[in-house]
Image: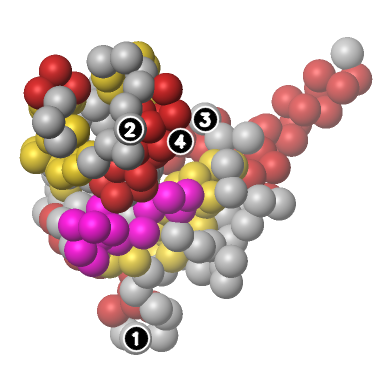
């Protein structure tokens, strides 16, 4: 009973911190921590050879002189494809060359003598980010090339009149844990804080008097230790 009351009081304190005064910094999420790195397996694709396979991509796989093993395969939502002889194979986050090397090894070990395998990304499903809270058009947006926080907010039609641009949170997966960092758009505009790069699957929440419920919902979905100690 005592533990439940203690946890309830701790959660209440967290929510109060999140919904602080408008147009001020604050809240439990650290501002621009130095170790808020790129997310797991999310390097920006500088070239198609470096592109990492995502769910719903379509891959063209060619096994030389083996038409029954060649064809186009769509990656399912779990990041896997079903291949002849091999069966279900997880391909998410692999480059096309890494997958080709894996197929050469797998087919060569049991079925073919020195197989020649090529893999190409025939249709790429764009990576996306979620922009929520006090922005003009909350929603899911594609990430094309290098994108910063300011650009992401602008893509969502900017902040609303009731927004608190000094408290913007980015949530992402780092080292297998959901982590968060806060940023101050006013400081970024004045070049007093670096404009951070955003990556596919990032969730961006702009605080404001019209979005505190959304902000709290995102906070509630995270392990508390990820906010306080995971950064």
Q: Do the residues labelled 3 and 2 touch (CB within 8 Å)?
A: no
Which quadrant of the figure has residue 8?
top right
Q: How far apart are marks 2 and 4 (CA)?
A: 52 Å
Depth check, front residue: 137 or 51 = 51
> What's the distance in space between the residues labelled 4 and 3, CA to CA?
5 Å
- Of the residues under marks 1 and 4, which one precedes in the sequence? 1
Q: In this view, does 111 lie above or below 198?
A: above
User: Dot 2, how many residues are within 10 Å of its Cα: few (below 14), some (14-19), or many (20+)?
Assistant: few
Which label number is shown at residue 218? Answer: 4
Write down the quadrant of residue 74 in the picture: top left
Q: Earlier in the sequence, mark 1 or mark 2?
A: 2
- What residue is drawn where x is 51% and y is 68%? 32
Q: Which quadrant: the N terminus? A: top right
Tell me if 15 is positioned left or right of 161 in this view.
right
* Of the two numbered discs 1 and 2 in the rendering, the one whose residue sits closer to the viewer: 2
Q: Mark 4 touching mark 3, by CB under 8 A?
A: yes
Q: In this view, does 107 lie to the left or right of 40?
A: left
- SS label for mark 3: loop
Measured in 3D between alpha carbons, the distance from the residue under mark 1 to the one under mark 4, in whole angstroms, is 28 Å
Name the foreground residue: 192 vs 49.
49
Residue at 33% x, 32% y: name it: 113
Query: Label 4's element?
Result: helix
The color scheme shown is secondary structure
Q: Give the range drawn in magenta.
A: 39-54
x and y percentages locating residue 44 in the rendered image: 30, 61
Q: Circle 3 is placed at which residue position?
A: 221
Q: Mark 2 points at which residue?
A: 113
Evaluate if marks 1 and 3 touch, with contact meaning CB atoms under 8 Å apart. Answer: no
Q: How crowded is mark 1: few (under 14 residues within 10 Å), some or many (20 or more)?
A: few
The CA distance from mark 1 to mark 2 is 59 Å
């Amino acid at each position: 009973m005592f533990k439940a009351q203690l946890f309830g009081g701790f959660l209440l304190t967290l929510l109060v911190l999140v919904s602080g005064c408008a147009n001020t910094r604050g809240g439990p999420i650290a501002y621009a921590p130095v170790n808020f790195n790129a997310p797991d397996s999310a390097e920006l694709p500088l070239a198609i050879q470096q592109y990492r396979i995502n769910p719903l991509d379509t891959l063209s796989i060619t096994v030389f002189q083996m038409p029954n093993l060649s064809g186009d395969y769509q990656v399912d939502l779990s990041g896997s494809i079903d291949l002849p002889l091999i069966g279900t194979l997880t391909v998410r986050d692999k480059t096309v060359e890494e997958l080709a090397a894996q197929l050469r090894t797998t087919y060569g070990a049991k079925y073919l003598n020195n197989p020649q395998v090529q893999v190409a990304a025939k249709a790429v499903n764009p990576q996306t980010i979620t922009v929520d809270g006090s922005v003009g058009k909350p929603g899911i947006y594609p990430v094309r090339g290098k994108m910063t926080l300011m650009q992401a907010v602008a893509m969502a039609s900017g902040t609303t009149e009731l927004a608190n641009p000094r408290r913007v949170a980015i949530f992402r997966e780092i080292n297998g844990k959901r982590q968060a960092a806060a940023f101050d758009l006013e400081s970024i505009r004045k070049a007093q804080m670096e404009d951070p790069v955003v990556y596919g699957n990032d969730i961006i929440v702009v605080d404001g008097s019209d979005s505190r419920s959304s902000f709290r919902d995102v906070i509630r979905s995270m392990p508390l230790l990820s906010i306080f100690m995971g950064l």
